[in-house]
Image (cartoon, rainbow, N blue to C red):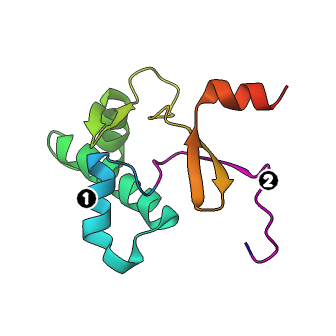
Amino acid sequence: EEYNLTDGIIMTQVVPLLDSDLPIVKDAQSALGNDFGMISLEGYVVGKMLLQILRDIPGEITRTNFLKQVQESKFNLGGIPIDFTDGDNQGADLIIVSQLKPQGFDEIELSDFAAMLK
């Protein structure tokens, strides 16, 4: 902003935008208060995911049981679908593409992003 450079700046991320209406974002904002931001949101989501997997482990928490539970995990994390059952170890397919505007980042559709690249 200092140099008024906003044209053509695109950002991709694996967590929702900070102004998203998803429950996980609202929960993070409430829990993190003044520390709420892009990086802390990602940490919050990962922490919540880890806790869910740990809670779902039947019996003792061991490395073996944890890895087995991850491979069997499929759940919704406050609006973000998590699925490790397909074997790709990715967990979530969420990708947000946004473009910098004078008021901040605005989400753009993947189809619009593809058209911008042509």
Please report the residue visible at 31 percent of the width from the left and 65 percent of the height from the top. 29
Please report the residue visible at 26 percent of the width from the left and 48 percent of the height from the top. 23
> Is 14 included in the stretch rendered in magenta?
yes
2 vs 1, front mark: 2
Q: Is residue 17 above or below residue 32?
A: above
Give how far across and how far down residue 89 sits, in percent: 50, 33
Crowding at mark 1 (Cα within 10 Å: few <14, some 14-19, many 20+): some
Is residue 37 left or right of 75 when viewed as pictured?
right
Q: Is residue 4 visible?
A: yes
Give how far across and how far down residue 7 sits, in percent: 79, 53
Extreme residue toward the left, this view: 59
Give how far across and how far down residue 69 sits, in percent: 30, 35
In the rendered image, which residue does mark 1 sit on?
Answer: 27
Is residue 19 left or right of 2 when viewed as pictured?
left
Q: Is residue 84 above or below residue 20?
A: above
> Is 108 included in the stretch rendered in magenta?
no
Q: How many marks?
A: 2
In the rendered image, which residue does mark 2 sit on?
Answer: 7
* Labels 2 and 1: the sequence-earlier one: 2
Q: Quadrant of the N terminus?
A: bottom right
| Stretch in magenta | 2-17
Please report the residue visible at 26 percent of the width from the left and 53 percent of the height from the top. 51
- Residue 43, image quadrant: bottom left
Q: Secondary structure at mark 2?
A: loop
Type of amino acid at the residue the image marks with label 1: Asp
Type of amino acid at the residue the image marks with label 2: Asp
- The residues tagged by marks 2 and 1 sit, at their Cα atoms, a distance apart of 32 Å
